[in-house]
Image: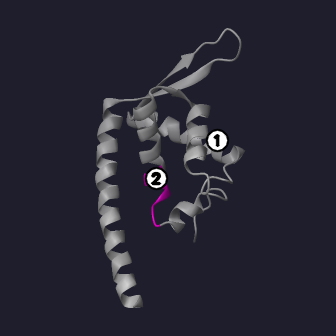
Amino acid sequence: MKRKCGRGCANFTDIGVSQNIVLRAWILSYLKLNGPKHGYDIISGFIETFKNLAEDFGPSEMGAFYKIMRMFEMEGLVTSSWEISVSGPAKRVYTITEKGIEELKDLEKKLQFSKSIIEKLINMIKEASR
């Protein structure tokens, strides 16, 4: 039975990478590269990065995003704080932790390993197609 997680997320599986590893690696990388960010900024950056894969990223997926960020907090990968604004509502700001940076290094190793396997398979397919 295929897991339902919104119309767009199945596309990650279509490219041969688990949705979980892509989201984890991307969010942690984004925070490491850009510093503390509001949730909306992170979502916008994700949509911009994965235009083709995230075209169906709607309100239900945004709700799921905030659950993911809460799980990251419980795992100690990020921290959050409230930013008070004079002109608008308070916004939660997320920051990567040292544990999040270590997780990012582990994810890079996993992705490099997956990349090497995929490259070997692509070469095999090319050879078989000749």
Residue placed at 70% from the left, 47% from the top?
A: 58
Q: Is residue 123 on the magenta stretch? A: no
- Corner quadrant of residue 89: top right
Q: Along the polypeptide, which appears first: circle 2 or circle 1?
A: 2
* 76 or 48, nearer to the observer: 48
Location of residue 28 (image quadrant) = top left
Inspect the image, locate mark 1, and give the three-letter code of the amino acid beneath it: Gly
Measuring 58% from the left and 32% from the top, which residue is drawn there?
41
Kind of residue at badge 2: Val
Disc 2 target residue = 22
Callout 2 crowding tier (Cα within 10 Å): few <14, some 14–19, many ≥20: some
Name the element at disc 1: helix
Residue placed at 50% from the left, 56% from the top?
19
Report which residue position mark 1 lands on: 63
Taking 74 as reference, is 44 left or right? Answer: right
Residue 66 appears anywhere in the view: no
Tally of marks: 2
How far apart are the alpha carbons under marks 2 and 1?
A: 18 Å
Please state the extent of the stretch shown in magenta in the rendering: 16-22
Q: Is residue 85 visible?
A: yes
